[in-house]
Amino acid sequence: MRAAKRASFLAVWILAIAFHSGCAQNDAKDESRPMTGPIAGPAGRLQVDDGGEGGVPVVFAHSFAGSGKHWSAQLEHLRSTRRAIALDLRGHGESEAPPTGAYAVDSLAADIAAVVEGLGLDRFVLVGHSMGGSAAVAYAGAHPDRVAGLVLVGTPGKTPLEQSTQILASLQADYDSVAGKYWNSLLTGARPDVEAQVRSEMQSVPRAASLAMIGALFAFDPLPSLRAYPGPKLLVDTAHDESPGGLHHLAPEVPRQVIAGTSHWPQMDKPEEFNRILDEVLATVK
């Protein structure tokens, strides 16, 4: 009898260890159980940085060639009072690249969907930067009831077809030169440590994947998804978002705040100002 009880206890203990090590994380539905590690995505493993408790959770999606580390200052700021999660989108950071090279914006939105489902998040605030903002828009438009608030940071509008075709042709003809000028422009105003981090990260994305992502962003029109999401939303921009095709020009009805004197990465260059804006948004979300 004692042997049977020991065997039963041992079986339960092994199952508990397996669960907390992540073997059962994709079935988890308890929002009080943060985790950090990989989650099964639609095109491979997705790395997740999850921590904190309380309040409506906040999910962060990074920019092209970035990672969840771009939100380190925001995660540290929020986790004393609420749960905050940053994911690495497919082909970025520690997440696997899709074997078929699928980087359409809807595919990136599917990565967000896999993470929030895997973590059991029923309702959350979604914050996306640049390419991650496009993915966030696509997700919010498809799942408006799940998104308690939408914050889009430096998120592109719709580039005219003629212009996007010219840019892609230039990249294919002389990728290093054209891409280098683009990065130099976006990094104007960056803190030295931010510039060093971004330049290091940009080297990690292969040329073929970069072209696929850029082409996918050009093909995506954010307006239908943005208008399909009726909840609270905010644009957070910098001087780098003043082009005629900027999202704030296409959707002037969406509230907007501008952080001056930064690169394309305001959450990294001026985290205190960005966090203040984020706190204002979160104070209105119930």
Image (cartoon, rainbow, N blue to C red):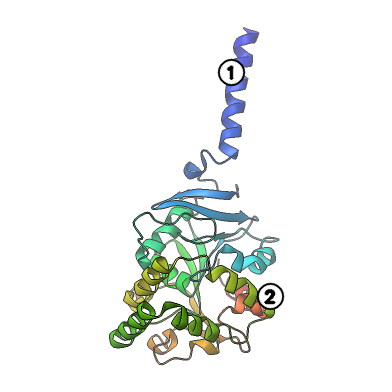
Residue 97 vs 228, above or below: the answer is above
Going by the image, does 275 lie left or right of 42?
Answer: right
Q: Residue 31: x percent and y percent?
A: 56, 50
Find numbered disc 2 in the image and state the secondary structure of the residue it sits on.
helix
Q: Residue 77: x, y in percent?
A: 69, 67
Given residues 18 and 54, the one toward you in this image is 18
User: Residue at the spot x=40%, y=92% of the render?
Assistant: 244
Q: Which three-letter amino acid code belongs to the residue tagged 1? A: Ser
What residue is disc 1 on? 8
Above or below for 194 versus 69: below
* N-terminal-most mark, 1 or 2: 1
Circle on res. 134: none
- Where disc 1 sits, the SS reads helix
Using a 10 Å C-alpha cutoff, classify the residue at mark 2 as few (fewer than 14 neighbours), some (14 to 19) or many (20 or more). few
Type of amino acid at the residue the image marks with label 2: Asp
Residue extending farthest to the top is 1
